[in-house]
Amino acid sequence: MSRSRYIGSGDARELPWSRNDALVTGGACVMNLLSYVFFNASDGLHTVSVTGFLFVALTALPLLARRRHPVAALAAVLALDATATLTVPLPRHFGAVLVVALYSAARACPGRVTALAAVVTVAVTLLSQSNGRIPPWQDAITPPLTTLIVVGAAMVMNRWQREVDANRRLLADRAVADERRRIARELHDIVAHHITTMQLMAGGARANLAEPEVVKDALVTLESSGRLALREMRQLLDVLRDGDEPEVAPSQPQPGTDDLGRLVAESRLAGVPTEFSVHGQRRPLPPTVGLTVFRIAQEALTNIRKHAGTARASVELTYRQDRVTIEVRDDGGGGSPQEGARASGYGLIGMRERVALHGGTLTAGPQADGGFAVVADLPLTTDQATVQHEGAHP
């Protein structure tokens, strides 16, 4: 939720209330003012005065603090409302300002505090509207009934909010589990590839025992593939979970950095102008790292199409000696970034799971000049960097 700000002395400071708080306060104040103008006062006389206007408007001011201090705001509203009722002839009714203050307190406070606040609200309202005397039963029904309705509505909303939060956590946990199962299946395919390569290299070395150079090259490749296979198998065991459903679809070749150009072309066809650039010496990456780079770029571009409207995007792939970085940014399309919609998405959960699997870091958030940025930095181990070097210099 955005905060209201004011500029003073060359700096920006946050006000203690939000724009929504100001709107709710103003709306409740207007409703009370209309009630003061168009309804009969408690003594039967319909008199409208500047003093009455000021009292009614003043009663609404504590609502600005209803989110941070709901009980104090309710107490202030009760005190000001009672003072206004005893000073200025006001209609006998449960005003909109008091309804909002009581509802806010009931939403934010536990049951005992809410019950006490309801009892005090009924007592103060009855005593102030009857000038300290016992009111007739007709007038004594409205405050308790209205209080019961307001508190009941707040309790229903609290229960609904708890159920929504529980469902959201459940969906998030399920998304994490699904993503980890997907990662496990992909790693399984990659490990199977390494084992197949090791088998072929071993067979080639056995068939060429009379040629030492050929055998040496085959054994070097076999050793490198074995190290990577063992490391990726450990990663596989870390993310596997009990109860995984068997994979029924046929395995497909896993994408990597070579497929980023196709991904960018698809983004352009979808209506998002996308630039693609590569920095550093382009060379083969380990399959798991290449797959992670591809998935992060894919999910980030999907989020741009969903949330950024007419934005322009850029994809940057940077090769370094011991790491690789993928950056996907958009300019926001001239609108405000929808931070909440992106930051809470399950796609970002999957990105973080993938990056954490490699011991890397992921940064995702709005940019200072507008738009949204996703930056993933994936380290390469010594063995992986060696494989890269051998792939770049056969």
Image (spheres, rainbow, N blue to C red):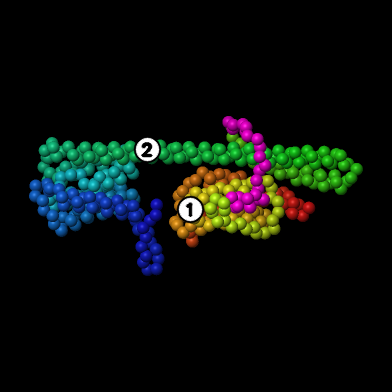
**Is residue 281 found inside the magenta-colored segment of the image?**
no
The reply, left or right, for residue 4 in relation to residue 38 is right
Q: Position of residue 308 (x, y in %)?
A: 49, 53
Local crowd at mark 1 within 10 Å, few (<14), some, or many (≥20)? some
Q: Residue at x 29, y 37 (%)?
A: 152
Where residue 160 sits, quadrant-wise, is top left
Q: CA distance from mark 2 to mark 1?
A: 32 Å
Q: Residue at x 28, y 50 (%)?
A: 73
The reply, left or right, for residue 304 in relation to residue 189 is left
Q: Earlier in the sequence, mark 2 or mark 1?
A: 2
Q: Is residue 297 visible?
A: no
Q: Residue at x 65, y 54 (%)?
A: 323
Q: Residue 159 versus residue 285: which sits nearer the camera?
A: 285
Residue at which label 2 appears? 160
Q: Position of residue 115 (x, y in %)?
A: 27, 38
Against 241, is 108 above or below? below
Q: Give the magenta range.
A: 243-266
The reply, left or right, for residue 15 in relation to residue 215 is left
For the residue marked with disc 1, what is the amino acid? Gly
Judged from the image, the secondary structure of the residue bearing numbered disc 1 is loop
Residue at which label 1 appears? 309
For the residue marked with disc 2, what is the amino acid? Trp
